Image (cartoon, rainbow, N blue to C red):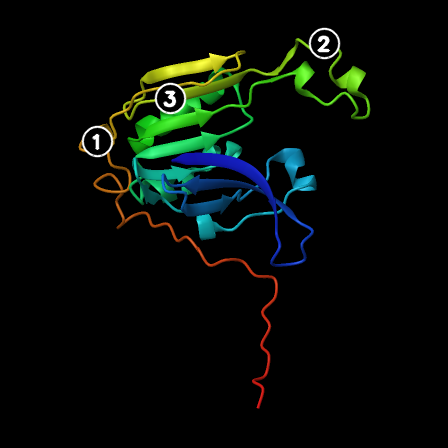
Amino acid sequence: MIVTGFDERDDDFSTGTIYNSVAIVDADGTLLNRHRKLMPTNPERMVHGFGDASGLRVVDTAVGRVGALICWENYMPLARFALYAQGVDIYVAPTYDQGDLWVATMRHIAMEGRCWVVGCGSALRGSDYPTDIPGHNKICPDPNEWINDGDSIVVSPLGAIAKGPLRQKVGILCADIEVAESAAARRTLDVAGHYGRPDVFQLSVNRARARPIVFSDPSQS
């Protein structure tokens, strides 16, 4: 099965807005979930729309319970908790972020959620930019320069790095994982279970799809 990030245009309303999205597709080709990024990061807000929580879901797949958050959504504690509370075993984080602090975040999420974390980085060199974009020579004067180091990584439910980070390399990062380790790790720390304290803390998530307009057409007699 695959988890893949993509940009999509909303064909239901207005058709003019682009969303930063991630899809989970099962082994038989079934689209199990599509999540639109809740908060576009920094200058992304000039281009992308705001997603809703209709896709803030963990789904059963052929390899376990899988959920995904995009880029800096992984810095949103309540969004993470929404996945933890749904029993995520494999937490996928497609991102443009990089560096030691991002790697530390991936390890923290694995420890916090007691889940496998797959951080999917964006390795990018100057030569990857189209040469016909305006100001190309100023933006990418050195085609061999690493614009983004990548830092794809796989982390175990106890925070140990299983593979990676794949830094300043273009390739496929592969790791063998044992999904049952996630449930076993929650015996000591389950932030949505015995560490959750619902008598003190509660999170409410509105998963209704945001609709800018609702048409009520009279019935035809």
Query: For the point 46% across and 20% down, which residue is it?
Result: 152
Q: Position of residue 62 (x, y in %)?
A: 30, 38
The residue tagged 2 is: 142
Q: CA distance from mark 2 to mark 1?
A: 46 Å
Label 3 – label 2 distance at C-alpha: 30 Å
Residue situated furthest front in the rendering: 28
From the viewer's perspective, tell me whether residue 181 is left or right of residue 125.
Answer: left
In the rendered view, would you say 57 is above or below 112?
Answer: below
Q: Amino acid at mark 3?
A: Val
Question: Is residue 176 in sight in this rendering?
Answer: yes
Whole-Å distance between the Cαs marked 1 and 3? 16 Å
Kind of residue at badge 1: Ala
Q: Residue at x 38, y 19 (%)?
A: 174
Quadrant assignment, res 116: top left
Which quadrant of the rendered structure holds the N terminus? Answer: top left
Rendered view: 63 above or below 17: above
Mark 1: few/some/many CA within 10 Å (<14, 14-19, 20+) = few
Q: Position of residue 33 (x, y in %)?
A: 43, 47
| Horizontal relation, residue 55 to residue 147: left or right | left
Front residue of 52/130: it is 130
Mark 1–mark 3 CB contact (< 8 Å): no
